[in-house]
Image (cartoon, rainbow, N blue to C red):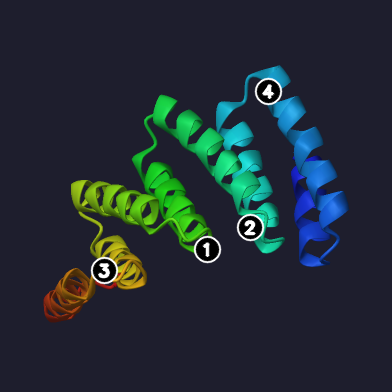
């Protein structure tokens, strides 16, 4: 845990070399002791550092490793977050087809979970990915669906949105 915290401190201080070093050391320890959830957290942290460095291929590799673990653990909330991280990185890599696919999977999980705020967020991300892909009509459909869901949520008094 200390290694993870030190990695976060160095990430916040923009010392990415040390952040990566501590996250990798933490990952090695988590793997050695069989802490899958902790290992997935380390992969997420490494992905964020690489994303911040515009090293998107390395970021997606870390997010995919995290997703594999989250899938094994059947952690649907975290799986959705992994898909969202992947989609965001794919957008930066100009791979809009993969971004749309990742955001669609995130949306499906949020719908399965019944998380209204997550559904709205995923619809917005999906709409923006379609826009980047030049699918303007589909983009408008997704963004309008997000607006409708947000309005329904507000009318229902859901405080998660």
Answer with mark 2 or mark 1, whichever residue precedes in sequence.
Answer: 2
Decide: few, some or many residues near mark 2? Use Cα within 10 Å; few <14, some 14-19, many ≥20.
many
Secondary structure state at the residue bearing disc 1: helix
Answer with mark 3 or mark 4, whichever residue precedes in sequence.
Answer: 4
Q: Residue at the location (25% across, 62% down)?
A: 119
Q: Would you name the residue on which mark 4 appears? A: 31
Tell me the distance, in whole angstroms, between the alpha carbons under discs 2 and 3. 24 Å
Which circle marks residue 120 in the picture? 3
Which circle marks residue 92 in the picture? 1
Answer with mark 4 or mark 1, whichever residue precedes in sequence.
Answer: 4
Q: Residue 95 appears at what percent x and percent y?
A: 44, 55
Q: In the image, is 8 to the left or to the right of 91?
A: right
Q: In the image, is 64 to the left or to the right of 104?
A: right
**Dots 2 and 1: beta carbons under 8 Å?**
yes
Tell me the distance, in whole angstroms, between the alpha carbons under discs 4 and 2. 23 Å
**Dots 3 and 4: beta carbons under 8 Å?**
no
Q: Residue at the location (19% across, 77% down)?
A: 140
Q: Quadrant of the C terminus?
A: bottom left
Decide: few, some or many residues near mark 4? Use Cα within 10 Å; few <14, some 14-19, many ≥20.
some
Which circle marks residue 18 in the picture? none
Answer with mark 2 or mark 3, whichever residue precedes in sequence.
Answer: 2
Q: In the image, is 63 to the left or to the right of 47?
A: left
In this rendering, the label closer to the viewer, 4 or 1: 1
């Amino acid at each position: 845990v200390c290694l993870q915290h030190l990695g976060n401190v160095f990430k916040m201080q923009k010392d990415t070399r040390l952040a990566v070093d501590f996250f990798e050391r933490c990952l090695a320890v988590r793997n050695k002791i069989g802490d899958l959830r902790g290992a997935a957290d380390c992969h997420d942290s490494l992905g964020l550092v690489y994303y911040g460095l515009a090293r998107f291929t390395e970021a997606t590799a870390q997010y995919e490793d995290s997703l594999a673990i989250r899938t094994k653990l059947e952690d649907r909330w975290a799986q959705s977050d992994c898909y969202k991280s992947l989609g965001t990185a794919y957008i930066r890599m100009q791979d809009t087809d993969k971004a749309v696919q990742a955001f669609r999977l995130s949306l499906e999980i949020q719908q399965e979970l019944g998380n209204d705020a997550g559904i709205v967020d995923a619809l917005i991300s999906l709409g923006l990915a379609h826009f980047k892909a030049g699918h303007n009509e589909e983009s408008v459909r997704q963004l309008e669906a997000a607006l409708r869901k947000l309005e329904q949520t507000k009318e229902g008094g859901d405080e998660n949105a």
